[in-house]
Amino acid sequence: MDKRINYRDFSMLIALVLIAAYFYSQDAHFLSARNLAQLGIELSATAVLGLGMLIVILPGHIDLSVGSGVGLIGAVAAVLVVGHEWSALPALGVSTLLSVLLYTAMGFIIIKERVPAFIITLGGLLVFKGVHWLVIASETVPVAPGGSENAYSRLTTYYLSNAAGYGLGALCIAGIGFFVWRGHQRRTARSLASDGELLFLRWFLSAQVILLFVLVMNQYKGVPLAAVLLGVVALAVHVLLQQTRLGRYLYAIGGNEEAAVVAGVPVERVVIGAFALMGLIVALAGFLQTAFGGATTTTTGQLMELDAIAACVIGGTSLKGGRGTVVGVLFGALIMAMLLNGMTLLAVTPEQKFIARGLVLALAVWMDVRLSQSRGA
Amino acid sequence: MPSPILEARSLTKRYPGVLALDGVAFSLFEREVHALCGENGAGKSTLIKVLGGVLGHDTYEGELRLGGSPVAFRTIRDAEAAGIAVIHQELALVDEMSIAENVFLGNEPSRFGIIDHDRMIDRAREVLARVRLDVDPGRRVRELGMGQKQLVEIARALAKNARILILDEPTSALSDREVETLLGIIRELRSGGVSCVYISHKLDEVFSLADRITVLRDGQTVFSVARADTDEASIVEHMVGRRVDELFPPATGGSGEVLLGVEKLCAPPLLVDISFELRRGEVLGIGGLMGAGRSELLMHLFGCFGERLSGEVRFRGAAYDTRRPPRNVARGLVLVTEDRKRYGLNLDASVGFNLSLSALPALSRFGFVDSDRELEQNRAMVGSLSVKAASLDVRVGTLSGGNQQKVVLGRALMTEPQVVMLDEPTRGIDIGAKSEIYALIRELTARGLGVILVSSELPELLGLADRILMLSEGHMGGMFQAAAATQADLLRSAMAKRAVATENDAHG
């Protein structure tokens, strides 16, 4: 809701810088263009899934099935491509449709039959996992036949050319500038308060960040397609939450569902819609995650639901609903992805990785609780 | 004159942008009931928070003295240890636990950490006897009525050896009989040596109970007097800072189109055979005792209570499905519920967010909210209802009760409705905000809207409504022209069904 860069986002930024600084001090490769591009691709699936989770958590629900969903949907597409020799795009389309149907159905059961989302999606976690293994007959299925490339595999291997990267960056900067400027004009025309200086400063800062990103990425192979997709999803979800009726309703239901009913919010449709969107996002995250691994195996997507929830929670999303932002979730996902990437770089054992990620999650939430208490008093 | 057992000197408390207390002085003597009056936002709640230790001593300026010596409470526990207990308007009982467990919550009689249940029950019985509550301490609190719950709260305070009770609007949810019981118990406690700070909007209670009365306005003590030396009019005058002559503006009377027609409506589990019409420009009052089905009737018409079994409900002549709240809002039927916190507001969200929530369909195109237009309309609504808030961006939970109620009303009005259903719109708000809401209701009917007003206060129904429908255990007890009805008529019909039922029982 709050349009200013708030205190919380700022503290996350500091945490991010500290983590980056630590890994950089241990291994200078951490901030190399190559590793950052790698990080961007790794991040994309988790962050996209985290944004979907945000949409479901805002109205006070949860989705534990998304990890298995990612595995299942990625596998269905892979089997269609490799086993049934479909071309990649129709395979991705049909799997996406399947995903939306599955998640809409879960939303329907949760709302109409009043079974808690926790239970239904826990059931989904197990069922999807089982179906995933059936679909691939518990074997490894690549996303493209015999080492070739297709639209599916390119999701995580395609990089924009340097020129295209700069072009896209410029387009983003111009686009943001245009919308900021138009909003400012409109508000001024209606004599509503609008701080032009602040708006310009924010636009200028975003422009710097975008430019820096493109510059660094172009030092390696260019801007990864996966990162572009993440950007598109993040922007879409941000607009959805901040500018649309559906977004307002998501916050309203999470804040006080009974009050939302009395206010005339179509609670049932909104929540089912949230799960349908989750289906769309699970499909995309499934394709990204599976393409990233190059193939679907029995462990693809495993525990991703927890990473998605962790990204939300670290990003300041309230599990009770009604509070959370896209920027927060992106920060949360970035912190988790950076930790994983950095620890891999330092050859930390898997056992220690689990422990470290768990501790960071607990620490982040504890600090959030402490900070919001001290501000509340 | 003896020295006060509790004294506050020049208390000043600042919140960002608001001076909540501005040099307030307050004193309480032993065996005294001291009533605290004031409009919402006058600083009563803040004063209680200071006295009860909710606000630590370092968050405000001024001095607190207990029995003549200065004290500094850091937490609620400190205040409780000093013998001060606050009983808030929203009761803090755990519904699923037994009465005894609630009474000793956080304070359980135990040995080596194991709770001694027998001793707990025994001691609970003792304190419950002091508040004359004759129920089994092992029963769940959920099974008790509001009045009994209130007494359990007091028992809990007594179990902690409180010598000073601070009661915040203790009677706002109680029936008349329960109020009488409560006032009697407070008198008894007073003769037993307990002092009370009593906060209420109901001046008749204040005058029947208090020894002294202090009026706060805008964070200052404007009036402090022995009860015998003042009268209700003068207290009200000090509360609002001006004379309130005409509380109820004159009625205009409804005529013309029937907006809402209800015929032989039956909706289990409560509503049986209800028929009425609401015309343009009319206020239809609905009265009845607790549990008579008043709120349930409104919620059914709005679409969130009960299945309709038989009968018909028409909106401007066309039958409508009573199970679709969003469609009903779009149609022009809005509901302002009684329990603002539970059914009314998203307390963590901003004033603006809450205000525009119902009107979003009109404020958006292709699903995108036009935030500039939204801002304009929110501002206009805040202005026309004179909501006191620092800005549209403040959390609505930080506003006073009266202003929260205005936000709920504003949200309903922003949809440009035809029929406004108000459930106890003035409950727990002060007389100044009340008269504003009365004036607003008149303004709505003058604009041709129909208003259904549910109220427990018979004078409010008689003063505002054109016609009054009395409900009795879900049945129609009677329909009255307000101009020709008396309080006695209304009460009799509110109990009509019961009387019949008892007669039948006697015959059977």
Image (spheres, coloured by chain):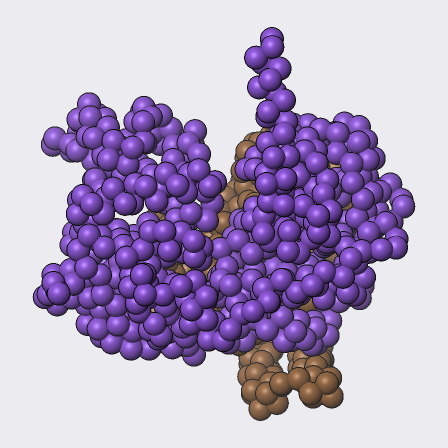
Chain colours: A brown, B purple
The answer to whether residue A51 is seen in the rendering is no
Q: Position of residue B426 (x, y in %)?
A: 56, 56
Quadrant for the N terminus of chain A, please. bottom right
Front-most of residues A12 and A343 = A12
Which residue is at the far bottom?
A197
Quadrant in the rendering for residue B138: top left
The answer to whether residue B259 is seen in the rendering is yes
Q: Position of residue B89 (x, y in %)?
A: 40, 51
Q: Residue at x 54, y 76 (%)?
A: B391
Quadrant for the C terminus of chain A, please. bottom left
Q: Residue at x 25, y 31 (%)?
A: B129
On screen, residue B65 versus residue B223, left or right, reads: left
On screen, residue A175 versus residue B457, left or right, reads: right
Front-most of residues B25 and A231 = B25
Which residue is at the far top?
B508
Q: Position of residue B289 (x, y in %)?
A: 56, 37
Front-most of residues A20 and A14 = A14
Q: Residue at x 65, y 31 (%)?
A: B474
Q: Residue at x 87, y 41 (%)?
A: B319
Q: How many marks?
A: 0
On screen, residue B321 versus residue B345, left or right, reads: right
Q: Position of residue A191 (x, y in %)?
A: 69, 87
On screen, residue B245 versus residue B131, left or right, reads: right
Question: Is B9 placed above or below B345 here?
Answer: below
Question: Is B434 placed above or below B476 here?
Answer: below
